Amino acid sequence: MKKYTKFLVSLFVGALVLTACNLDNEPKEYKEVTVADGVLILNEGSYFAQINGSMDYLDYLSNNVERGIFKRINERELGGTPNHAIVCGSKMYIATTDENRVEVVDATTLKALEPIQITAPRELCTDGKSVFVSSYTGEVSKIDTLALSVVKKSEKIGANLEGIAYRSGSVYVCNAWNSDYTYNTNLVKLSAESLEKEKDITVVANPNQLIADGDKLFLASWGNYGDVPATIQQIDLFDNVTTLTNATQMAYANGYLFLIKSSYDENWNEVNSYTVFNVTTKEETAFIEGRDIDSPCAIAIDPLMGYIFIASRKKYPDADGNMAVSYTQDGYVVCYNSYGALVNRFPCGVNPGTMICVTHKAKYPVY
């Protein structure tokens, strides 16, 4: 059995250990804990086929997926290309690119509030007080979460901005690609307070995904789809960049990066591999073989439950009767435990791209 899995289990499993007690005793106090409820799945739909995005919800208690939950609750479509979502306080923010807005919904009920108009929003991050939004206009917007309005906007700092993350008073944003489909090699660092540019950080071409966790900051660059491979990098507190390994997608928890590496062979068949990278030891080991996955779209971790979720497009019969990956039909999500064992597989909408773990606070007696 792999060494890392034993360590992962001790880190991931959020079990509550209550001391043995006499039923006649009154509790000394109540301890507040975070309880995992399920996972929201944000499906991007298809821009080219004019298929709206949607939201599904995997409920841990019932072990079922409620399809189209946003539409059911709000009696309208989510719209075209809901690309990313985050939770800040009591609200969830959803960047809906084609609709030129950031949806704001109650994080508990999913009831939509008044949306915030931002042109071509892509991804979001938060410092716990404000929400920052990258955009295909080349600007970053700052949303006041009390006023629910844009209070600051950066100058044009790039072309098509993608991933964004907050760390230690600064916002980092990926300057990914240009309208002529050339690829940029800079991560832009902004002041979180003023959105003034602090510096450019040179990285591998086509930076796309950022993950911040405390002082740690990880970047996935997708390269040029040729001689520059997709690369995972780490940026330290002095903004020095270290190359860790090659991969296209990542999720992070408790010192481990779970990675997907996607490429194509000489016959244009998709080839994927799935690994775990120990950030401390720099050891990379296999996670799963991936036989359950057709064409991965996203990866996420629920650290409370110890689950790793991989979203995928699905293969359907084409006009010739051959099985082919569909970008216009429903996909699915596969759930694994930290050992890489299959837990379950759930249906979802077209092109699932973001997964958000849903939790609530509860009080338990301490005797």
Image (spheres, rainbow, N blue to C red):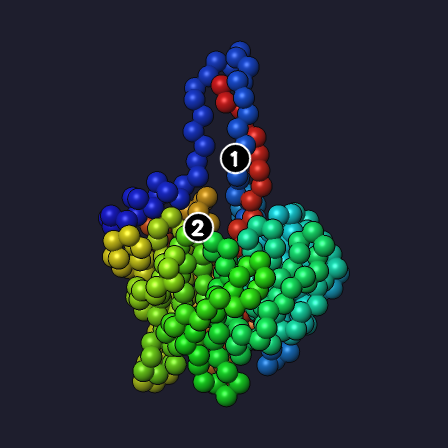
Amino acid on which the number 2 mark rests in the picture: Gly
Q: How far across and how far down the image is residue 102, in percent? A: 66, 64
Residue nearest the viewer, comparing 358 with 167:
167
Kindly report the distance in space between the C-alpha atoms of the residues bearing marks 1 and 2: 20 Å
* Image-based side of 231 in relation to 95, left or right: left
Q: How far across and how far down the image is residue 158, in percent? A: 52, 77
Using the image, tell me which numbered label, if any, was put on residue 266. none
Amino acid on which the number 1 mark rests in the picture: Val
Question: Please, what secondary structure does the residue beneath circle 2 have?
Answer: loop
Number of numbered discs visible in the structure rendering: 2
| In the depicted structure, whether residue 230 falls above or below residue 40 | below
Mark 2 nearby-residue class (10 Å; few <14, some 14–19, many ≥20): few
User: Mark 1 sits on what residue?
Assistant: 33
Q: How far across and how far down the image is residue 229, in percent? A: 33, 76
- Identify the residue at image location x=66%, y=56%: 144
User: Mark 2 sits on what residue?
Assistant: 214
Observer able to see residue 192: yes
Q: How far across and how far down the image is residue 354, in percent? A: 53, 62
- Identify the residue at image location x=31%, y=58%: 277
